[in-house]
Image: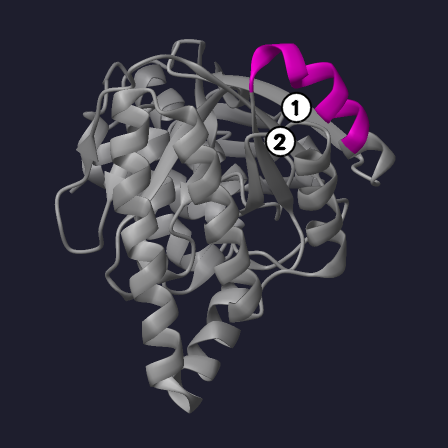
Amino acid sequence: MNRPPPDVVAVERSAPGKIILCGEHSVVYGYPAIAVPVSDLRARARVEPAPPGSGLQIEAPDLHQSLHLRLAAEDNPLAHTARLVLAHLGHAEPDAVLTVESDLPIASGMGSGAAITAAAARALAAALGEELLTETVSQITYEVEKIHHGTPSGIDNTVIAWERPVYFAKGRCPETFRIAAPFDVLIAHSGITSSTRGAVDEVRHRWHATPAYYEMIFTCIGAIAHAARAAVEQGALQALGTLLNENHELLAKMGVSICKLDGLVYAARSRGALGAKLTGAGQGGNVIALVNEPALPAVRQALNEAGAIHVWHTRVGT
């Protein structure tokens, strides 16, 4: 039987977005990938007390959602997050309002859903006088990611919960690792939303049709991710840029790039980026460009001219 919840206190928590440096899609099949947090763009969750007997109200203005936990569908991600947290804590439904907002674009490969879940889970627990372990936040986020993506790789929940660069392979403990020196990345939003679940399912269908071809690509991308970790640990940014370029070409051969993404990638390279690639599931979303600081204005301009609807700057490893 659930314990009555303690008095709710007003709290706010946040969680970062993420980008995958190397390893998209192949990570679903057991090959390594590298992801890093985007701490400059965050999801935020706020919990405030509500009148006795009102239960838990969830507000998500960015998603145009307003719902009551008792009436919410089982597969609603925000409601599922709240239910998982309450079950973990052994608390009954509190009288509170949970509001979530995010800087992160939706369906763009930056982990917006995972960031909202992690922030909401932490905020709800804190409002009830508890602080969740990072591993618990990661586990809850992974369960909710199943609603978003069907068969999530596990990389989003890991890097967002821990907020550290992560070397990840499915079925193995994630490894955080050292960054020799901070580096600058521009993230350009194509303006085209994409479904991670849909893109992953399409790749799976193609893999079933021609397994040898796709296993060859996955193996190459896994090797790139391994080499990219070494480049980051050594501060070898020129080598890292080359690896990003190679990863993009393999993703294009896999069929997950589109003309808009290719155009952004080549625009960034043409104006001085050390390397550029799509990030996330592809078929839309974002590209990332590794850029030395003096070239940032020129590469940003090139991305805007190539049709990016937003260009964000983040420094990895600060």
Label placed on residue 273: none
Relative depth, front residue between 44 and 185? 185
| Secondary structure mainly formed by the magenta segment | helix
Spatial CA distance of label 1 from label 2 is 5 Å
Q: In front here: 140 or 51?
A: 140
The residue positioned 74% from the left and 24% from the top of the image is 300
**What residue type is disc 1 on?**
Trp
The total number of labels drawn is 2
In the structure shown, which secondary structural element does the residue marked by tag 1 occupy? strand
Residue kind at label 2, given as amino acid type: Ile
> Residue at image x 51%, y 29%?
54
Mark 1 packing: few (<14 Cα in 10 Å), some, or many (20+)?
Answer: some
Vertical order, 207 against 269 (above or below): below
Q: Residue 308's quadrant in the figure?
A: top right
Give yes or no for residue 54 being in the magenta stretch: no
Across and down, in percent, residue 1 comes to: 15, 42
Q: Is residue 124 rendered to the left or right of residue 287?
A: left
Q: Can see residue 154?
A: yes
**Which residue was labeled with disc 1?**
312
What residue is disc 2 on?
187
Find the residue positioned furthest to the bottom: 209
**Residue 74 appears in the picture as rendered:** no
Please say whether residue 299 is one of the residues in the magenta stretch.
Answer: yes
54 and 115: which one is in front? 115
Mark toward the start of the polypeptide (1 vs 2): 2
In the image, which residues are magenta?
292-302
Query: Front-most of 41 and 249?
Result: 249
Residue 41 quadrant: top right
Residue 55 on image: x %, y %: 46, 32
Instruction: Please say if 300 is above or below 7.
Output: below
Query: How far from the left and from the top, in percent, is residue 51?
Result: 51, 19
